[in-house]
Image: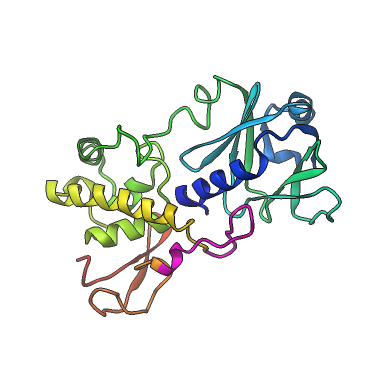
């Protein structure tokens, strides 16, 4: 699943590609992707004639802003946006097409059909689900060492599970939780409330550092993820543990292990993360 660095890369790419384009029409091949409004015809009618004025992000959600609306889009497992000429053949996995007046299309492609779109009038997008109850952004002023210490002290969950909770902190998913915990030398099954102040300080720093590095590298190309221009993220070349089961730890040479924590495949070094 694309995580915050991948979604931020898509945001930047789309901002370069579709800003100031006017929507002429919309084709919806899979209406279940449209969650709000309840009828996809309302979705189409609302956005016809609207111009793209900005591309935002909240956690793992893209926010496509027009003059009057905020389109909140979650890519889920394999969602992708592509800008193409409108005479290009339509792929069978393309489910929503935004037709622009300049004869280009923004096409949403999703093999598994897990992606979602919610349309709100501007100003309402943060008052309703799915954005209303999200935690702070990792790069925000709200995400301090004290905040991390306080939220971890209040939970009786394992640290891996706590960090995946988007209500506590947005943007972290399986890849970057594993990476941040490795860099902090914290075992993924440690109880979150057991972390000592120095460990929390290190973890806070490594979360921010890991995500910043991933954004700079364009994210990680895991399985089928590419950005909106078909380019692969290069951060997967920097990964220490994720997807490297059985390979040697880059720090100590110990074979890396994969276990399941909270239903999620979890990679760690049994020597560095005791």
In this view, 37 is above or below 9:
above
Residue 263 visible within the image: no
Q: Residue at x 71, y 39 (%)?
A: 32
Q: Is residue 249 left or right of residue 226?
A: left
Q: How is the image coloured?
A: rainbow
- As rendered, which of 17 and 274 lies closer to the eye? 17
Location of residue 94 in the rendering, given as x and y in whole percent from the top left corner: 75, 51
Residues in magenta, as a range: 222-237
Residue 46, above or below 250: above
Q: Which of the pair 11/128 is nearer the observer?
A: 11
Picture layout, residue 254 above or below residue 181: below
Question: Within the magenta stretch, is there residue 228?
Answer: yes
Q: Tell me: 174 left or right of 65.
A: left
Front in this rendered view, residue 94 or 33: 94
Q: Position of residue 268 (x, y in %)?
A: 31, 67
Quarter-of-image position of residue 38: top right
Residue 209 in view:
yes
- The image quadrant where one finds the C terminus is bottom left
């Amino acid at each position: 699943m694309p995580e915050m660095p991948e979604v931020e890369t898509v945001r930047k790419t789309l901002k370069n590609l579709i800003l100031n384009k006017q929507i002429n029409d919309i084709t919806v091949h899979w209406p279940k992707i449209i969650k709000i409004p309840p009828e996809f015809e309302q979705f189409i009618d609302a956005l016809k004639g609207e111009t793209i004025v900005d591309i935002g992000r909240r956690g793992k959600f893209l926010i496509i802003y027009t003059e009057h609306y905020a389109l909140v889009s979650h890519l889920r497992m394999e969602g992708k946006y592509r800008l193409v000429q409108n005479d290009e053949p339509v792929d069978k996995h393309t489910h929503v097409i935004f037709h622009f007046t300049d004869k280009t299309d923004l096409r949403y492609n999703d093999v598994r059909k897990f992606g979602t779109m919610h349309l709100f009038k501007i100003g309402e997008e943060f008052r309703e689900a799915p954005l209303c109850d999200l935690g702070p952004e990792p790069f925000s002023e709200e995400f301090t060492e004290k905040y991390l210490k306080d939220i971890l002290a209040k939970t009786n969950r394992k640290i891996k599970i706590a960090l995946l909770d988007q209500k506590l902190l947005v943007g972290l998913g399986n890849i970057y939780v594993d990476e941040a915990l490795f860099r902090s030398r914290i075992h993924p099954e440690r109880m979150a409330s057991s972390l000592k102040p120095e460990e929390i300080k290190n973890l806070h720093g490594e979360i921010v550092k890991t995500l910043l590095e991933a954004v700079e590298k364009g994210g990680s190309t895991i399985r089928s993820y590419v950005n909106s221009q078909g380019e692969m993220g290069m951060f997967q070349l920097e990964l220490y543990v994720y997807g490297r089961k059985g390979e040697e730890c880059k720090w100590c040479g110990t074979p890396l292990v994969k276990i399941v924590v909270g239903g999620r495949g979890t990679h760690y070094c049994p020597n560095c993360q005791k």
